[in-house]
Image (spheres, rainbow, N blue to C red):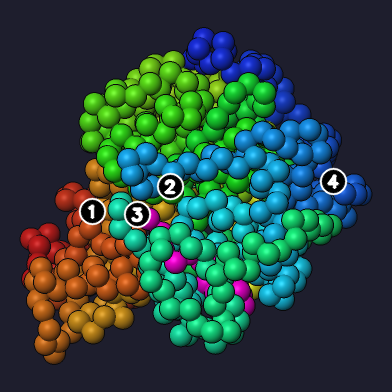
Amino acid sequence: MSQAITSVLQEHRIFQPSEHFRRHIGPIHVPSMDAYRQTHARSIADPESFWGEVASEYHWISPWSKVVEWNLPDAKWFVGAKTNACANCIDRQIDSGHGDEVAIIWEGEPCAPDPEVRRLTYRDLLRETCRTANALKSLGVRRGDVVTIYMGMVPELAIAMLACARIGAAHSVIFGGFAPPAIVDRVHDAKSRIIITCDGAWRRGQIVPLKQNVDDACAKLPDVEHVLVVRRTQSAVTMKPGRDLWWHDLIDSQSDTCPCEAMDAEDLLFLLYTSGSTGKPKGIRHTTGGYMVFTAYTAKMTFNLNPDRGQVYFCTADIGWITGHSYIVYGILPNRVPTVMYEGAPNSPREDRLWSMVARHKATHFYTAPTAIRAFMKWGDQHPKQHDLSSLIVLGTVGEPINPEAWIWYHEMIGSSRCPIVDTMWQTETGGHIITPLPGCVPTVPGSCTLPFFGIDAAIVNETGEELEPNKGGLLVIRRPWPGMLRGIHGDSQRYFDTYWSRVPGMYVAGDGARRDERGYFWIMGRIDDVINVSGHRLGTMEVESALVSHDAVVEAAVVGMPHEIKGTGIAAFVTLAPDFKGATGDALRRQLGEHVTREIGAIARPDMIRFTGALPKTRSGKIMRRLLRDIAAGKESTQDTTTLEDFSLLAKLREGDE
Ligand code: WT7
């Protein structure tokens, strides 16, 4: 199990929904625990009528014949229905007379001295999306194709996604922090022929060379036909004639209108690659109807969104991850509440950047990750104190278990002790929130993500699927399908079954260890597979190991998580070196290996600690004893049984440090 940060604060207080929330949020969608319990019970007892009613709030081109069809492990939602996710985000708001309201508020990173702000109304968004959709068509993109998007956080990123959705092409967004080899794997697996990128992206005053990274990747991607480039940083780039096109050259001349493709509810909306237990990231498949309904509805309930109430929603995630897909774009736009998009780093130009944005845009909702909160704490209270945060009503967190210190600081310092905190537990695979408080009714306890969302039949079970008694740790499972669930792993249906549905027959195994307390509240204990959660970003230990062994100096590598003050989990690497390697040694080699991993995967995968060792501890059957390494990385005396360890003297050496 990966290690959550150890908490020194014991926090048992229960926080009731606040008066401030009640007074300022507008209509409360779930106002009491009775209402929550009744609705949850109904959603589980009769999912068909429950989700049928929820779905009818959204725009459909033609209706479904059946709400759900379940042939384990394959689920179909809104069978036979036709819709378009882009229409639900944009056209629907215009058709109901709200076209001139703000859909997206965007802020660029550079401040000279004031930041560049762009506000796009639904009408603006429609025009830009249609032009982009027509441009993609002119490049030969057709319904069913996969378009890769590797961009910074600029409005054109959301526009590109919506344009794909409009014409029935799926998108595959790659986080801008990934390095060229990671791009190659993903583009190759998705069989994308078109990549949309930017010349560069602003990050802490520096330029991330996105286009250069795409060029490097394309050297190994002969099937890429076109690269469409948004000009953002004005940095010098090489444009390959015939292949590369400037966004503004192609898009500005396109027609402002483009019809929406009528998509089947089960047509692919997007792929998003995430890490698993093996070295190869998996392309998680999300389809149109179920994802659209689930993200819009969870956003509405979890954040208690209300249009016409001056709400402004600000999520600090990058759209390169699922949080940005679901809770910056697809889940927020259908709710007709402006969504704030920020381009850069939270400490650029100074550590008060996000608070200045909350104040400037009068954000009512703020959604971030525990790792960010721990960084804010470290930067100091003076930064939030400089700004007027009184517009805030609901705070959210996501990505990893939140330690009580961070929870309390967030509550007091950012929320003035009057904003409910929704600790939302979910995954790339779940599409949207699966366990979360609802801010108008569920009392919160720091560190617990509380209760299952409607339609989510979550439980803690043992390996045979029996539900465990309160406070016993076990596997987190979901016992029936939900609309936002993944529909598979791209190109690998066996891996889909094996990963999620085979460990406990008939149940979706999330990959997390958890317990439920007497109140029924869930407490997530951490991953049970070889996945670590670094700053709320998922990484496979094997991916990092493969990157390390691809360096000439390394023979073998074992990577485990270790407690880290800011990241929650840091990366510890145990490495055996090639005896005949003639290059750098010691810290210089550590630095080289760190840079090598950054080049192979990206900076998020760079180890926090590298320890050189003559051998790795293995069982007699040759398996690396990771649990032992985790204890060593955490500086703990190991409590693990070491009787199967091949070489006992190795243990003592590993504890001492380098060989
Ligand atoms: C893993 C999924 C969903 C967007 C961000 C991460 C962990 C996520 C919580 C939370 C405790 C959490 C789990 C999960 N996780 N949210 N509120 N409390 N743990 O998405 O990259 O797919 O990672 O993140 O371990 O399995 P992801």
Task: In the rendered view, tell whether residue 618 sits above or below residue 295.
Answer: below
Q: CA distance from mark 1 to mark 2?
A: 43 Å
Q: Is mark 3 within 8 Å of ligand 1?
A: no
Q: Residue at 38% of width from left, 21% of height from top?
A: 388
- Asked if labels 1 and 4 touch by Cβ distance under 8 angstroms, the answer is no
User: Nearer the observer, disc 4 or disc 1?
Assistant: 4
Q: Earlier in the sequence, mark 1 or mark 2?
A: 2
Please give the range of residues in magenta.
186-203
User: Nearer the observer, disc 1 or disc 2?
Assistant: 2
- Please state which amino acid type lies under the numbered disc 4: Trp
Q: Residue at 66% of width from left, 33% of height from top?
A: 101
Residue 636 lies left or right of residue 308; in this view the side is left
Q: Earlier in the sequence, mark 3 or mark 1?
A: 3
Residue that label 4 marks: 60
SS under mark 2: strand
User: Nearer the observer, disc 3 or disc 2?
Assistant: 2
- Asked if labels 2 and 4 touch by Cβ distance under 8 angstroms, the answer is no
Q: CA distance from mark 4 to mark 2?
A: 35 Å
Nearer-the-camera pick, 593 or 580: 593
Can you say which quadrant of the picture contains the C terminus? bottom left
SS under mark 4: loop
